[in-house]
Image (cartoon, rainbow, N blue to C red):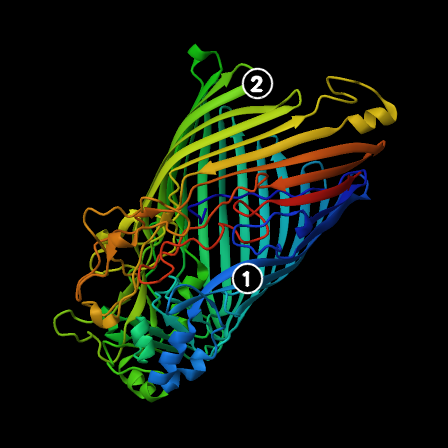
Amino acid sequence: GASGGGQVNVVSKTGTNHFHGGAFEYLRNDVFDARSPFDPSQIPPFRLNQFGANLGGPIVKDRTFFFANFEGLQQRLASTLIGYVPSATFRTKAVATSPALQPLMAVYPAGKPYGDPNVDQVTVQGSNSVREYSGMIRVDHKFTDNTTFFARYTIDDALTDTPNGALGARDNLEVRPSNLVLQLQHIFTPHIVNEAKFGVNRSAYRHPTVGIAPVDVSLGSSGSTPGLFDDLIPNALDLEIGTTFNYVDNLTVNRGRHSFKMGAEIRRIQLNNSGNAIDTATITYASLQDYIDNKLDSVSVNSALGVGGMRRTMWMGYGQDEFKASPNLTINMGVRYEYYSVMHEVLDRAAVVDIQGCGGFCPKGTPYYSPDRNNFGPRVGLAWSPRAFKGKTVIRSGFGIYFSPGQNDDFSDPHESTAQRLNVSSADIPNLSYPIAPFLSQAQASGVSPKGIDRGRRDLYYENWTLGIQQQLPGSFVGSVGYIGSEGHKMFTNYAVNNLDPVTKKRPLPQFGKFNIKRNDGNSNFNAFQASLNRSFTRGWLWQTQYMWSHAIADGSVGAGETVGYQNVNCRKCDRSATPYDVRQTITMNSVFQLPFGQGRRYWHAGGLAGKLIGGWELSGIGTASTGRPINVVVTRSASALPDGNSSNQRPDLVPGVSIYPDNQTISHWLNKAAFAVPAKNTWGNAGRYIARGPGLWEVDTALEKKTSIAEHADISFRAEAFNLFNHPVFANPGNNFAASSFGRISSVLNTGAIGTGAPRRLQFMLRVDF
């Protein structure tokens, strides 16, 4: 419960009456790797060591056992980063026209020409380092044959230092999650079992950004959308310490053909956080000429925010019946209820904002929002094996409604509004310029920009349904086809409010600037056809193939609880489109094959040294292919050019009769700029969201492993792995800002990190001992 997506169960090992354990080391090094199309001739340095050991055994024979595990990871990865900066000609012109810009121009690194007289390209080697250590200890105790107990504690300590863009800013992340679980299980009778759990999750999170400029300078960008130049990034600091206490009880009762299960959970949330622990400011220029003339389009100032204490409690319960209606038909029916209390600040320091109810800020002590007490989620499922198919065919179907409380730190907005937040644009102050100090008094009088939550919001939920048919086939294969459907309702959304009246050009609340209100009124849907052909591991060979055709649609959000905001807040249907993760077709194949040589294998049953050398080999691989990912084509516009002054998430016009793709498509010319145009003043663009597609991908990963017995109860394994074996380039999406010279230009592979699909070919070696 409390989640509309995947449900994840974690199983940890236990000790036994015999000591068992292992140790391992994984190694990567750039000397074994290939370069990406954007790397220099010398491959950037890369070192990765992942290592660990575990041990389990008895404390008291037949009664008390332990298991302990440690893992460590040390990574030093360099990658090629491409950015865009003012050319020497542009800098000279800007400083000559507006001398106040000299400190900003001096921050940009020097670049090289690449086709635009105003924009140079910067290619640098970014350094990414990770240090992470994780430990776990578990103790199991058997009080009696009917009563058992275990306690488990895990902790992870990680520190990352990564580039924030190509201009020199860096993100440092320190995070230390830990988890404690206590579980008592008692068998009252052979038909009644109870399981009681207590858990604590705690995560200390510190995220400082080491900047390169006194303010965030954005040219022609909108939020995370790439601009004409890369942003100049200032220092920032995000602090969070989250603690969750869980109390869970599950009771199972078996009666004849019925298996009843019921349970309850109480979850207490404590989140101490500050999303903006130091003063920050952002200035935006809408065009190259505005930058030269020092004509700012918008200014945002956020004062340092102290740490607030967010608190809420979740109450959840369920009941279900698994009914064996006949030997070939099983029906599951149940219902779950979830109540999430209203988040509040523990010392009542929040500043709640409500335009309709309070005309701005509400009196101290006003609840953030109204509670939602209607979260009843029915569940039903069936598994049927028609007798006519002699047990070789199974039909499964199910439906359920799943609620979600949303991300805890999304409810911190009333606390974040206690610090001074200002936002003004060129539509409010026509002569905005840098430095911004002379305009702060005017912004304080007419540009207060809090963060709010819709006080009538409701909890988001998903309706999920499935239908699948599995068929046993010759050769130990199983084929299946299925349909998966899902609809999300009351999804998390974010609205820019207090916009300008298109007629009077005044804001409804004159003392406030534009600000954001979080609501829950978005919708999404997902439909997919799935087919698979699987062979279980039989006679040394496993094979799995999965294919999916799918379509994901949402109206202004990503579809999974996140939000990107609307182009026109009064026309949400104008933002209904494919979602960013709408990959229409994907196929994955994987196989494991034990080479048929050596002891216990099909051929050459030689023993001794020869058997050890020739036997124990295993070949495996994964092949993946998918169609391209969606591209949201956007355009930078001045606030004064929009009817309501909201310049966020704007899209261009489509030119009738012109294809959005060029005739000779290349990675340097993926989109056709002639197909788009800047909308006329006081109109919104008519291009839809995510109307273009980026490159597809295919990749093959493979591994060869040798397992050798070194003692009666000990084995050693050596494994060599190749990711992206053929070094096939897997490109990222191109620049999507129509106003930028990088529009339609691909400048990166899909994955610049150390692991995962989309990186250049990388080799990994593993050595493992198990006993």
- At x 15% / y 69%, what residue is drawn? 502
Q: Tag 2, which secondary structure?
A: loop
The foreground one among 695 and 404 is: 695
Name the image quarter holding residue 113.
bottom left
The foreground one among 333 and 614 is: 614
Name the image quarter holding residue 80.
bottom right
In the rendering, at what x and y percent does residue 618 appear? 69, 30
> Which labelled disc corresponds to residue 86?
none
Residue of label 2 = 476
Badge 2 or badge 1: first in the primary sequence:
1
In the rendering, at what x and y percent does residue 701 appear? 59, 38
> Which labelled disc corresponds to residue 243?
1
- At x 43% / y 75%, what residue is drawn? 88
In the rendering, at what x and y percent does residue 5 appear? 44, 45
Cα distance between the residues tagged 2 and 1: 48 Å
| Horizontal arrangement in the rendering, residue 385 relative to residue 27 (left or right) | left
Name the image quarter holding residue 446.
bottom left
Q: Tag 1, which secondary structure?
A: strand
Q: Nearer the viewer, mark 2 or mark 1?
A: 2
Circle 2: is it few (<14), some (14-19), or many (20+) Cα within 10 Å? few
- At x 23% / y 47%, what residue is drawn? 658
Q: Is residue 96 visible?
A: yes
The foreground one among 385 and 567 is: 567
Mark 2 touches mark 1? (CB < 8 Å): no
Q: Is residue 498 visible?
A: no
At label 2, the amino acid type is: Ser
In the rendering, at what x and y percent does residue 426 appear? 26, 77
Quarter occupied by the C terminus: top right
At label 1, the amino acid type is: Thr
Q: Is residue 733 above or below residue 330?
A: below
Q: Is residue 319 above or below residue 471?
A: below
